[in-house]
Amino acid sequence: MNIHFETDTVLVRDFISTDANGIFDLDTDPDVMKFLGGVTLNELSEAQSLVDDIIWQYQEFGMGRLAIIHKGTDEFVGWTGIKRERKLRDFVYYDMGYRLRKKFWGQGIATDTARLSLNYGFNELNLKEINAAADMLHFASQKVLLKSGMQPHGTFYYLGEEHNWYSIDKKRWESLNFKT
């Protein structure tokens, strides 16, 4: 198992095939999916396909979303990390994202792992710029992005919904001096 980083409460590692159950729990919750098009998974096989795609991204691009696991309970918390995005916008970019099971909301896990993901992207993957997007009405996600040091750079529409666009470059990241 490849662990990339950890906090006091969670570890962040590569996805493995058995994480499909965690993805299924995550992506069948309507509250979790509210600002992500509202479409929930219906079958475990759909979650397995998502995990298989993440594992393929590791092989194809050397990066992808990472599983967040609670240290105390070994529970699947959600995911974080950077991937080469090829669907959301009409150009290729490096996207930092996160999604957590509802029971873990409000504990600082999204912000902590987002910052660690950015650090990983700049210092391990040697990226020059990392971007992110959040639905205009998803205030909690926007707060995480801002607390992670990302800056808003306009809006765009995806699936008929307006989204804020965020970015950060390595120079700005280094100037923030977050303890990671």
Image (spheres, rainbow, N blue to C red):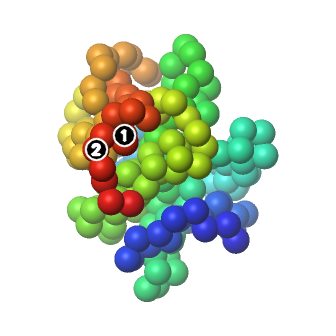
Q: Is residue 142 left or right of residue 116?
A: left
| 130 in relation to 76, above or below | above
Disc number placed over residue 27 in the picture, else none = none
Q: Is the residue under label 2 in contact with that under label 1 (CB below 8 Å)?
A: yes
- Name the residue beneath numbered marker 2: 176
Q: How many marks?
A: 2
> Identity of the amino acid at label 1?
Trp
The quarter of the displayed image where residue 166 is located: top left
| 128 in relation to 105, above or below | above
Q: Is residue 118 left or right of residue 121?
A: left
The quarter of the displayed image where residue 137 is located: top left
**x and y, in percent, of residue 138 in the image:** 26, 38
Q: Residue at x 57, y 16 (%)?
A: 91
Q: Quadrant of the N terminus?
A: bottom right
- Name the residue beneath numbered marker 1: 173
Q: Residue at x 28, y 44 (%)?
A: 176
> Identity of the amino acid at label 2?
Leu
**x and y, in percent, of residue 103 in the image:** 32, 68
Q: CA distance from mark 1 to mark 2?
A: 5 Å
Q: Is residue 61 left or right of residue 154?
A: right
Q: Nearer the viewer, residue 158 or 71?
A: 71
**x and y, in percent, of residue 146 in the image:** 25, 40
Q: Residue at x 53, y 47 (%)?
A: 123
Q: Quadrant of the C terminus?
A: bottom left
Q: Residue at x 37, y 42 (%)?
A: 174
**x and y, in percent, of residue 31 in the image:** 33, 51
